[in-house]
Image: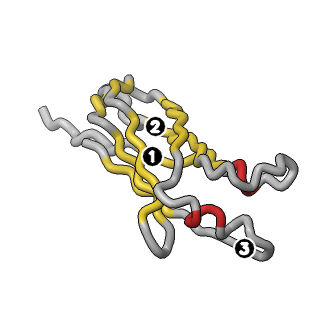
Amino acid sequence: VHRLRPSDPKCSIEYFYVPALNKTLNSRTNTTLNFMVRLANPNRDQGIYYDDVHLSLSNANSSVANYTVSRFFQGNKKKTKKWGQVLPFNNQAVLGAVLPNGSAVFRGDLKTQ
């Protein structure tokens, strides 16, 4: 019997919010990073046991923050949403985007086994 190798899960960041960037809140100093990681198991006949899922956020200059989703099991053909919140290592990495004409680009890297 020939068995197919299981497919890798699909991972994405579906939501990313920084209160300091919301001008209606008038909360320019709240640099908390809020996000939702979505993981989808495409396998029809097999669940996935995840070790801790490590999320690293960075910008062009440096590492901004790290977050860990604790290990979990995901059933076959299931989708999971994991919400997270973390403070940046250095507020300046976020506050630069709040300045008039400011901007910021964040990169998110996910790693697990």
Mark 1–mark 2 contact, CB under 8 Å? yes
Mark 1–mark 3 contact, CB under 8 Å? no
Residue located at (32% from left, 49% from top): 111
Q: Is residue 80 left or right of residue 27?
A: left
Under circle 2, the secondary element is: strand
* Place of residue 16 in the rendered image (x, y in percent of width and height, measured from the top left): 62, 49
| Cα distance in 3D space between marks 1 and 3 | 29 Å
| Cα distance in 3D space between marks 2 and 3 | 34 Å
Q: Specify the label residue 11 is tagged with.
A: 1
Q: Is residue 8 left or right of residue 89?
A: left
| Type of amino acid at the residue the image marks with label 3 | Gly
Q: Is residue 32 left or right of residue 98?
A: left
| Type of amino acid at the residue the image marks with label 1 | Cys
The numbered mark, 2 or 3, whose residue comes first in the sequence reads 2
The residue under label 3 is 102
* Place of residue 45 in the rendered image (x, y in percent of width and height, measured from the top left): 32, 26
* Place of residue 67 in the rendered image (x, y in percent of width and height, measured from the top left): 42, 44
